[in-house]
Amino acid sequence: MGIGKNMKYIKEEYESEVARLEKLNNFIKSKEFETGTDEEQKKLLVKKQKALAEYVSIIAEQIKYDMKKLQDEEFDVENYDDIEKSHFNKK
């Protein structure tokens, strides 16, 4: 699968994981977490929050890398004549 097609799936994964992280963050900030969750569960949820945040940041890095690679491929030319032919209308 090419980078362009893969970007669609990576972006969907990113959006999904960001939503999961946001939901977890909201729960950790809630009164229920503070009063209704035992200490061991709190530790596990905070650990999960950190891991998920790290995972989301890795996906974001991958998106940035792939976008740069796509842009580089778009402008990968042998010489300036190729740029002129492909990006400027000559009459």
Image (tube, helix red, strand yellow):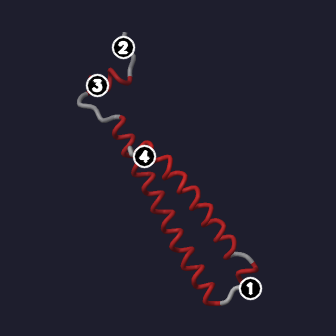
Tag 1 or tag 2, which sits nearer the N-term? 1
**Residue linked to disc 2:** 90
**Residue linked to disc 1:** 36
Tag nearer the camera, 1 or 4? 1
**Residue linked to disc 3:** 82
**Residue linked to disc 4:** 67
Marks 1 and 3: CB-CB under 8 Å? Answer: no
Q: State how far apart marks 2 and 4 are (Cα).
A: 29 Å
Q: State how far apart marks 3 and 4 are (Cα).
A: 22 Å
Q: State how far apart marks 3 and 2 are (Cα).
A: 12 Å
Marks 1 and 4: CB-CB under 8 Å? Answer: no
Q: Amino acid at mark 1?
A: Gly
Task: Please give the name of the residue rendered at 63% of the width and 84% of the height, measured from the top-left corner.
Answer: 42
Tag 4 or tag 1, which sits nearer the N-term? 1
Q: Amino acid at mark 4?
A: Met
Marks 2 and 1: CB-CB under 8 Å? Answer: no
Marks 2 and 4: CB-CB under 8 Å? Answer: no
Image location of residue 68, percent across then percent down: 39, 46
In the rendered view, does 38 fall on the left or right side of 2? right
Q: Closer to the camera, 24 or 61?
A: 24
Marks 3 and 2: CB-CB under 8 Å? Answer: no
Label disc, if present, on residue 74 of the rendered structure = none
Q: Closer to the camera, 44 or 76?
A: 44
SS class, disc 3: helix
Image location of residue 25, percent across then percent down: 64, 71
Q: In the orientation shown, which residue stands out farthest toward the front?
A: 1
Q: Is residue 43 above or below residue 74?
A: below
Crowding at mark 1 (Cα within 10 Å: few <14, some 14-19, many 20+): few
In the rendered view, does 4 fall on the left or right side of 47? left
Crowding at mark 2 (Cα within 10 Å: few <14, some 14-19, many 20+): few
Tag 4 or tag 3, which sits nearer the N-term? 4
